[in-house]
Amino acid sequence: MSLFGLGGRNQKTFRPKKSAPSGSKGAQLKKHIDATLGSGNLREAVRLPPGEDLNEWLAINAVDFFNQVNILYGTLTEFCTPSTCPTMTAGTKYEYRWADGVTIKKPIEVSAPKYVEYLMEWIETQLDNESIFPQKLGAPFPPNFQDVVKTIFKRLFRVYAHIYHSHFQMIMSLKEEAHLNTCFKHFVLFTWEFQLIDQGELAPLYELVESILKL
């Protein structure tokens, strides 16, 4: 079983699992991730492999982290409902409103499950767009690629923040806290290594982030 494997009832995902970019480079980097994760050294696992392209590394990891959050949130869909979570919050101080700048330009208040649905749909659209995430080996990444990646990771963090603040008791009763903590630790180490999330955005889970990074 992989480090991020889930057993039994939890093998449902919120949305269909995404595959890594095709081509030998994508497969090679995916093997590198799996091998380094298998060693249990997450700090080592997030580093850019020597001689590899940074954008390729960000792309393949964006897909991996999307899939991880997808599986984690998928285990909570029966507990995270419009009645239990009428707004997308991370504790009492932080509320997230949805806007994608295209179909919804002005931020709107929606329930947590609706927010996560919009968020994952938006990320999936980016991952499927070959002009942003090229599938062909050697195809160029767009100039704004790293900005898109930063927005993806910022939004995935919000799902983690909601899970920890609103559903951690349920995660514990499902005996998934070790899995959640390992996934989040991997996520924090990766985003910190490449400065993908502004420190202010981390505020809802800052104590946890600090303990992971030992700042």
Image (cartoon, rainbow, N blue to C red):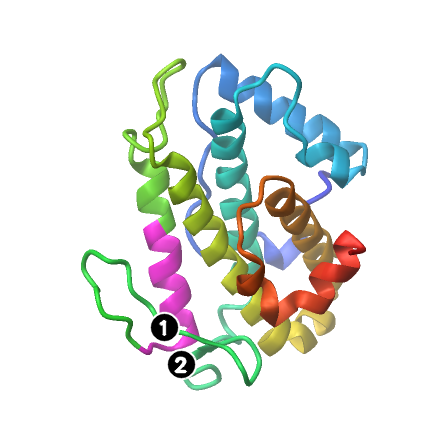
Q: Report which quarter residue 31 is drawn in.
A: top right
Kindly tell me whether residue 88 is visible in this rendering.
yes
**Residue wearing tag 2:** 82
Residue at the image point whose x is 34% and y is 36% from the top = 144
Prevailing secondary structure class for the magenta stretch in the rendered image: helix
Quadrant containing the N terminus is top right
Kindly tell me whether residue 75 is visible in this rendering.
no
| Up/down of 94 relative to 144, above or below | below
Left/right placement of residue 83 relative to residue 187 reads: left
**Gap in angstroms between the C-alphas marked 1 and 2:** 14 Å
Image location of residue 26, percent across then percent down: 50, 21
Image location of residue 88, percent across then percent down: 44, 75
Q: Neighbour class for label 1 at 10 Å: few (<14), some, many (≥20)? A: some
Q: Amino acid at mark 2?
A: Pro
Q: Which residues are magenta?
A: 109-122
Residue 120 included in the magenta stretch of the image: yes
Residue at the image point whose x is 74% and y is 60% from the top = 210
Nearer to us of marks 1 and 2 is 1
**Residue wearing tag 1:** 97
Residue at the image point whose x is 65% and y is 22% from the top = 49
Residue at the image point whose x is 67% and y is 73% from the top = 168
Quadrant containing the C terminus is bottom right
